[in-house]
Amino acid sequence: MAEKNCAVCGNPYKGIGSSCKDGSYCDACSKKLRLVCREDDAEFMSASQIREMLNRYASKIEAYDTVQKPETCPFCGKKLPKLLNLRMLDAYICADCGNRAAEMLHTGYDAIGYKCFSEIAPLFSQAAVQGGKEDASGRFHDADALRIVYPLIRTLLEDPEGGYDVEYIDPLDSLSDAELRAAEGLAAQRREALKTQYGEHKALFEVDDIAKLYNESKGRRGYRNEYRIGGRVLFGCINRKDTAAVTRADGTQSFCIKKLGDSRAYSNDLKEVKEGAECGLFIEGTVSCIYPGDILLID
Ligand SMILES: [Zn+2]
Ligand SMILES: [Zn+2]
C-alpha cells in the first residue's frame, strides 16, 4: 500500500488510517485523539481542529498512563468507589461528581471523561453543585431551604450551530454574606405568607403553561386524554401520586399527579420535585378548568 501523509501531524504513514471531515490521519494521531474526543465526533472535525485539540491537551496525553487512582474523590472527598468512578484525562473522580458536572455542563456523563480536571473544577465551587454555600464564618447554608426565595433562573443561550441551549444561573452564587444569612429568615416569612393566603397544604404549584399530549404516527397526531402542566413549586415538595386541586366559583376539582417531569425535558420520571424548582405535572383526565397563573393546591 502506498504511503500517505497524515492530515493532522504531516508524517507519512501506512495503512487505512482514520478519516475526518477533510482528510485522513495516522494511527498514532488516532490513538491520542481517542483520549480527548469521541470517535463519532472526530468524523465531523477538520484536520486542523484535531491538530489544535491534540496540541491543547499534549502534556495531558503524554502523561495519561502515569495518572494514579487516588483513595478519595478530589471533588467531594469521599472514598473513591472501585467501580463507580470516572477516569478523566488527568484525574479520577467519583460517579456522583461526574454526573453533577455533566448536569451543569448539559452534556453526557461520558463527555466528562474526555475533559481535564482544571476544566470542570470551577463548576464545583458553585452553590448548585455543592448543594448550598458557606458564609465567611464557615456556616453552610443548605440550597434546598433557600430555593423558595432564590430559585435557579433558567436562561436561553443562542447556540452558534443553531437553536438555543438552556443555561441555569444560580442567584446563591452572587449573594453577599449578609444576604446569605438573611435568606433563611426570608424563606420562613415567605412560607408563612403563603400559608396565610392559601391555607395548610403539602405544597403549592404555580401554573405557567398547559399542553395536551399526543402521539404522532404517519404525520398524524392522535391526542391523548393526558396533559402536561408546566410551572414552579412555590412551596413544599411534590411527589408522584399527590393530588392537585383547583378551586373555581362552581367548586373544587382535583386530579391525581400521574408522573413528574423535570424542567428541561419534562420527560424524566421524577419521584419528587423540591421547593422552588420548575417541573411538569402529568395529569390524566379533562383539565380544561386549569389556566396559566393558577395556583394548584397539592396534598
Ligand atoms: Zn498523524
Ligand atoms: Zn466525588
Image: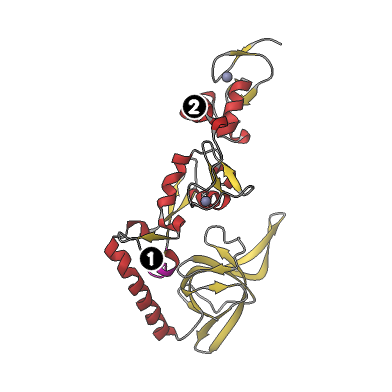
Residue 147 counted in the magenta span? yes
Vertical comparison of 170 with 235: above or below: above
The x, y position of residue 156, in whole percent, is 44, 53
Residue lying at 59% horizontally and 47% vertically, measured from the top left:
85
Residue type at the position of mark 2: Ala
The prevailing secondary structure element of the residues shown in magenta is loop
Residue type at the position of mark 1: Tyr
Q: Quadrant of residue 110?
A: top right
Placement of the C terminus among the 4 image quadrants: bottom right
Q: Which mark is residue 266?
A: none
Q: Is mark 1 within 8 Å of ligand 2?
A: no
**Direction left: furthest residue:** 178
Residue 158 located left or right of residue 41: left
Q: Secondary structure at mark 2?
A: helix
Residue at label 1? 150
Residue at label 2? 58
Residue lying at 69% horizontally and 19% vertically, measured from the top left:
16
Density class for disc 1 (Cα within 10 Å; few <14, some 14-19, many ≥20) is some
The x, y position of residue 48, in whole percent, is 50, 24
Density class for disc 2 (Cα within 10 Å; few <14, some 14-19, many ≥20) is few
Residue 35 located left or right of residue 224: left
Q: For ligand 1, give the image quadrant.
A: top right
In the foreground, 194 or 182: 182
Q: Is residue 103 visible?
A: no
Q: What is the basis of the colouring in this image? A: secondary structure
The x, y position of residue 269, in whole percent, is 62, 63
In the foreground, 115 or 13: 115
Vertical comparison of 209 with 45: above or below: below
Could you tell me how far apart the alpha carbons at marks 1 and 2 are, in whole angstroms?
42 Å
**Chain part drawn in magenta:** 145-151
Q: Secondary structure at mark 1?
A: loop
